[in-house]
Image (cartoon, rainbow, N blue to C red):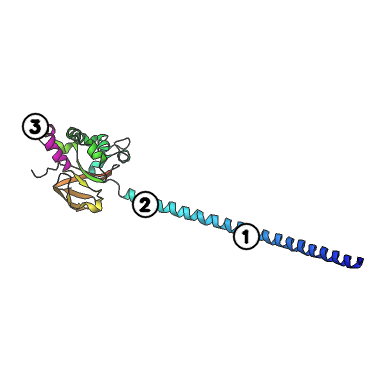
Amino acid sequence: MFSTRSKTAAAVLCSAAIAVSASACGSSSSKPSAAAAASTSTSAAPSSGPTSASASSTGSPSMSAGSSSAPFGSACAAVPSTGAGSFTGMATAPVATAASANPVLSTLVTAVQAAGLVDTLNSAQGITVFAPTNDAFTKIPADTLKAVLADKTKLTKILTYHVVSGRLSPDQLAGTHATLEGGTVNVTGSGQSFQVNGANVVCGNVQTANATVYIVDTVLMPAS
């Protein structure tokens, strides 16, 4: 009887030993798995780095492409190099506000204010503006210019004739475009040389927060 109990106890102890041994084996085998997982995780981490770098480098060409479409033309040299009236400063403000900081466009700004179009232009979404320089306004006889500035209806008609819906890039500029006044303007040329109804673009592709601006050397006149 005692012998049978002994055998039974021995069998139980043996089973327990086998179980502990199996558990130990399982435990040791799970460690390599964890290490493998960690290794896999570690190896995966560098792969995310290049992906980010790739995305970042993808952004750089985009910025490069933007800079390749920088303002062009002889009158661009007269635009301030720093401050609110510079190309960088103008890009952060809506078009009427941006123009008011640029000394090249001070007469145009006076005309826009006289016509009450500041808010209209600033709130417009995606427009192209052909902006006459100060010298462009001096081509108009002083008495005529004074009379136009005093006639809000006529002034509004002239100024809205300089505005086209949509932001036109240099590649899209050539052609006939409908203006906010209701008439059309005809743009000829290519590259960095354009004319709008015969007026020369002297500084083109100037960006503001809501508009692309082409500065011209002559005031455009709509059909009466």
- Judged from this view, the residue extending furthest toward the front is 1
The residue lying toward the viewer, choosing from 73 and 86, is 86
Q: Quadrant of residue 202?
A: top left
Q: Look at the image and tell me in which quarter the N terminus lies.
A: bottom right
The residue lying toward the viewer, choosing from 78 and 123, is 123
Q: Which residue is mark 2?
A: 62
The residue lying toward the viewer, choosing from 114 and 100, is 114
Q: Quadrant of residue 71?
A: top left
Using the numbered discs, state the Cα–Cα distance from disc 2 to disc 3 in whole angstroms. Answer: 49 Å
Magenta stretch in the rendered image: 149-160
Q: What's the mark number on residue 143?
A: 3
Using the numbered discs, state the Cα–Cα distance from disc 3 to disc 1 in whole angstroms. Answer: 87 Å
Q: Earlier in the sequence, mark 3 or mark 1?
A: 1
Q: How many marks?
A: 3
Q: Residue at x 32, y 50 (%)?
A: 68
Q: Which residue is mark 1?
A: 36
For discs 1 and 2, the disc positioned in front in the rendered view: 1
For discs 3 and 1, the disc positioned in front in the rendered view: 1
Residue contact at pointers 3 and 1, CB within 8 angstroms: no
Q: Earlier in the sequence, mark 2 or mark 3?
A: 2
Q: Earlier in the sequence, mark 1 or mark 2?
A: 1
